[in-house]
Image (cartoon, grey):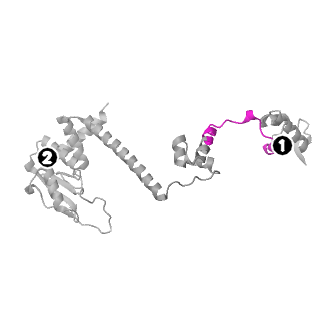
Amino acid sequence: MRVTHATGKGGRYQDFETLRERALALRREGHSLRQIRDELKVFNNDILNRLVKGEPPPAWTKRPNAKDDLRERARELRLQGWTYDRIQAALGCSKSSISLWVRDLPKPERKRTPEEAAAIGRKGWEEKLRIRDGERRQTKEEAKQAIGKLSARELFLVGVGLYWAEGAKDKPYARRESVTFVNSDPGMIEVYLAWLDLLGVQRERVRYHVMIHENADVAGAERYWADLVGADATAFNKTTLKKHNPRTVRKNVGESYRGCLVIKVLKGADLYRRIEGWWCGIVGAAASAD
């Protein structure tokens, strides 16, 4: 076999076997592929690899692999019967890498039935949820304590923002200069009523009514909201019942569902205009803040 390969400026061709002998000799002397290429002037990678085929590269040309130690350790653990999850937890590497490293090894025998394994998995997940729930409660409690006491001005500003987010607003195409607030969160209701008290709105000017799905505990919801706001039946208008669509799957069900409470301030046009003005003032102040 002959290869068309130039060996110098003269462009002469050499016999492949002769060229291979020279390449192998250089390889055994510890030359890298690049050094052999430069020495023999073989710049075709395919031919170059064929010339040294079967002769291992010198040790100094091998690049160290940072994962070699991990791979060997993973194989040792797998032979001891460890699962992918245990190996991953111990070595900190991905399951995909572990799978590639140990796929030629026999699978460890199951020490537990599928039911036992599932029960252990559920227990571990429940413990994780318990820890996560504890962290959640701790974060909320720390944030709660960070608030401290509210000044009158702070409550005033909070109330303006609260109303503008959840209250009824006047529109150019529908004049509604009324103060009406709707929400299902008891905390929002309590803050809003405290804000009305701060503004000097007498409770005699406040009316309530409940909005709730017709298939919920209507009477229970009415009692709950009345107790929360500290008002008797005379301050409550007729409850609005929302018709249930049988094709809709509702998630707001159970004892915690009490619908929404609507709070309306009678003769509230002047107060509404002030609220809108206060909100515009907050927007302007925020835009010009340093």
Q: Residue at x 18, y 54 (%)?
A: 262
Q: Amino acid at mark 1?
A: Leu
Residue type highlighted by circle 2? Asp
At a point 17% along the width and 59% down the height, the residue shown is 220
Q: Residue at x 63, y 41 (%)?
A: 72
Residue 266, visible in the rendered structure: no
Q: Which mark is residue 136?
A: none
The image quadrant that residue 175 belongs to is bottom left
Which range is magenta? 45-72
Residue 108: give x, y in percent of width and height: 58, 52
In the image, is 99 to the left or to the right of 235? right
Q: Which residue is mark 2?
A: 270
Which type of secondary structure does the marked residue at label 1 adopt?
Answer: helix
Residue that label 1 marks? 51
- Looking at the rendered structure, the secondary structure element under dot 2 is helix
Q: Is residue 95 above or below residue 233?
A: above
Residue 183 point in image, percent of width and height: 22, 52
Does the CB distance between marks 2 and 1 fall below 8 Å?
no
Q: Residues within 10 Å of mark 1 (few under 14, many from 20)?
A: many
From the viewer's perspective, is residue 248 above or below residue 87? below
* In this view, the mark in front (2 or 1): 1
Q: Position of residue 121 (x, y in %)?
A: 44, 52
